[in-house]
Structure formats: structure tokens, C-alpha cells
């Protein structure tokens, strides 16, 4: 087993006005980014289910399931994320996130939406072969941004970029540092079914790290529905 420790994570979601390819009609799909933290909480009475699956070039497949719940309205939101990994010699549940996000600002005119998030990281249980690195994560600062273009009201092109510096402590107390850049172009499409919304997306995340590059495949599924009236 790979032991982990509980920790707190602070993340900021910031979103400016989206880019439209045709008319200035508002977006019909808003809170459906793949990699970048969203800046829009769920509306009152509506919760969201999100499933993502990413297959990397080495055959590793990472799944995650997220549920987002508004708390009394759009200002406060609780969510949780459960990851699961499948790879040669490694499989199991990763670190579970319990999240609280505050909608400080809502998008209006030129004013961007702003929503900081605080997460409690609970240790997961990962089964691994003996040759898998069992180091302890020290710090992993992340900076991310995205551009979304509305090709049609319910069909968007997007490109996300994430840069992260990962530092860990190996078994022999040696510090290991790695900086990675992920550029992920993709598409998302949605359907409104009564008071429910279904969104499906696909992307090709390209990772640049340590002078090498690799490309994976990411699939995204979201289903929003009311839970109270």
C-alpha cells in the first residue's frame, strides 16, 4: 500500500467573458471544464454528476467521479471527487477530495466570475507492485487557464493549459522535482432534456515533462438534474 496524509488544498476559479464565434448569445453550457477549475457554482436546487476518464500513452487509465451540490443557493457549494486508477502494477482508489467553494463574484459585463475552493484531501488506498515509487508528495503548485469558443449554442471548442511543479520526497529522503505542462484541445456538446442537461466532451491532453512529450485521450460526461423544487 502507498500511505498518504490528509491535507488542505486551496484552489481559485476565475472566469472572464467567453469567446463567441458568431452572435453574442449567452453560453448554454457554462460549468463544464475538463481540467481547469470552474468559477461557477451550481444553481439552487440543481446538482451535477461528472465522470472523466483519461488514458495516457503508457496505458494507464484514470477515472474520477464528482458530485456538486449547492448549499442553500448558488453562493455556497459542496462537492466530492473520488478517483480510481488502473495501470500495470497499480490500481485502486486515489486521494478523495471533499470540497467547499464560495461564489465571491458572479460574471456581469466585464467583471469575471470568481470562486475560491478549499479541499480536504483524504488518503486513498492504492495497491502497487514493489517497484513503484512510494515517495511522499511535498508540494504541487498548479496554474491553469482555458479558452472556450462557442461554435454553436450547445457545441464548443476549448483549449486548456495546466502547468504544475511537483516535488516529492523519495524513500531515501531525496527531493525529486518535476515541472510538467499540459495543453489539452477538445470539444464539448450538450443537450437540454426538459430541466436536465447532458454534456459529453473529448480532449487530447499533451504532456511535456523532462524533455519528453506524450499524448493521451480524455473523455468527459456530465449530467445535471434538479433535486428539489
Image (cartoon, helix red, strand yellow):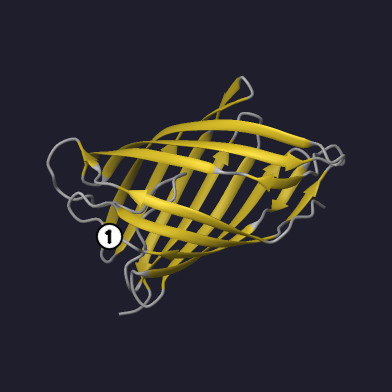
* Residue at (14, 37) in percent of width and height: 22
The location of residue 180, given as percent across then percent down, is 58, 31
Viewed as shown, does residue 99 lie left or right of 197? right
User: Quarter-wise, where is residue 54 in the image?
Assistant: top right
In front here: 45 or 106? 106
On the rendered structure, is 67 left or right of 168?
left
Location of residue 152 in the rendering, given as x and y in whole percent from the top left corner? 21, 41
Label 1: which residue? 106
Q: Is residue 223 left or right of residue 93?
A: left
Q: Is residue 204 visible?
A: no
Residue farthest to the top, as pictured: 211
Residue found farthest to the left: 23
Measured as percent of width and height from the top left, residue 107 is found at: 25, 56
* Vertical position of residue 186 compared to residue 135: above or below: above
Q: How many marks?
A: 1
Neighbourhood count class around disc 1 (C-alpha, 10 Å): few under 14, some 14–19, many 20 upward: some
Image coordinates of residue 55 in percent, x first then y, are 58, 37
Q: In this view of the protein, which residue sits in the foreground, 157 or 8? A: 8
Q: Residue at x 24, y 46 (%)?
A: 17
The residue under the point 64% across, 52% down is 84
Q: Is residue 218 visible?
A: yes
Q: Is residue 119 above or below residue 57?
A: below
Residue shown at 29% from the left, 53% from the top: 191
**Viewer-side residue, 63 vs 25:** 25
Query: In what element is the residue under mark 1?
Result: loop
Quadrant position of the C terminus in the picture = bottom left
Amino acid at each position: 500500500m502507498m500511505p498518504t496524509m490528509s491535507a488542505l488544498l486551496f484552489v481559485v476559479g476565475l472566469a472572464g467573458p467567453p469567446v463567441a464565434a458568431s452572435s453574442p448569445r449567452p453560453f448554454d453550457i457554462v460549468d463544464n471544464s475538463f481540467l481547469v477549475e470552474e468559477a461557477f457554482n451550481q444553481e439552487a436546487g440543481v446538482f451535477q454528476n461528472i465522470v472523466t476518464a483519461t488514458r495516457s500513452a503508457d496505458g494507464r487509465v484514470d477515472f474520477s467521479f464528482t458530485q456538486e451540490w449547492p448549499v442553500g443557493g448558488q453562493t455556497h457549494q459542496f462537492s466530492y471527487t473520488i478517483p480510481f486508477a488502473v495501470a500495470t502494477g497499480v490500481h485502486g482508489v486515489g486521494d478523495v477530495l471533499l470540497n467547499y467553494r464560495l461564489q465571491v463574484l458572479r460574471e456581469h459585463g466585464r467583471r469575471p466570475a470568481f470562486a475560491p475552493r478549499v479541499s480536504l484531501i483524504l488518503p486513498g488506498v492504492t495497491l502497487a507492485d514493489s517497484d513503484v515509487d512510494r515517495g511522499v508528495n511535498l508540494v504541487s503548485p498548479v496554474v491553469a487557464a482555458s479558452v472556450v469558443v462557442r461554435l454553436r449554442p450547445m457545441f464548443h471548442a476549448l483549449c486548456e493549459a495546466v502547468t504544475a511543479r511537483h516535488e516529492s520526497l523519495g524513500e531515501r529522503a531525496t527531493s525529486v522535482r518535476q515541472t510538467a505542462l499540459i495543453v489539452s484541445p477538445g470539444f464539448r456538446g450538450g443537450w437540454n432534456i426538459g430541466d436536465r442537461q447532458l454534456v459529453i466532451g473529448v480532449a487530447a491532453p499533451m504532456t511535456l515533462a523532462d524533455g519528453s512529450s506524450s499524448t493521451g485521450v480524455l473523455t468527459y460526461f456530465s449530467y445535471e438534474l434538479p433535486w428539489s423544487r
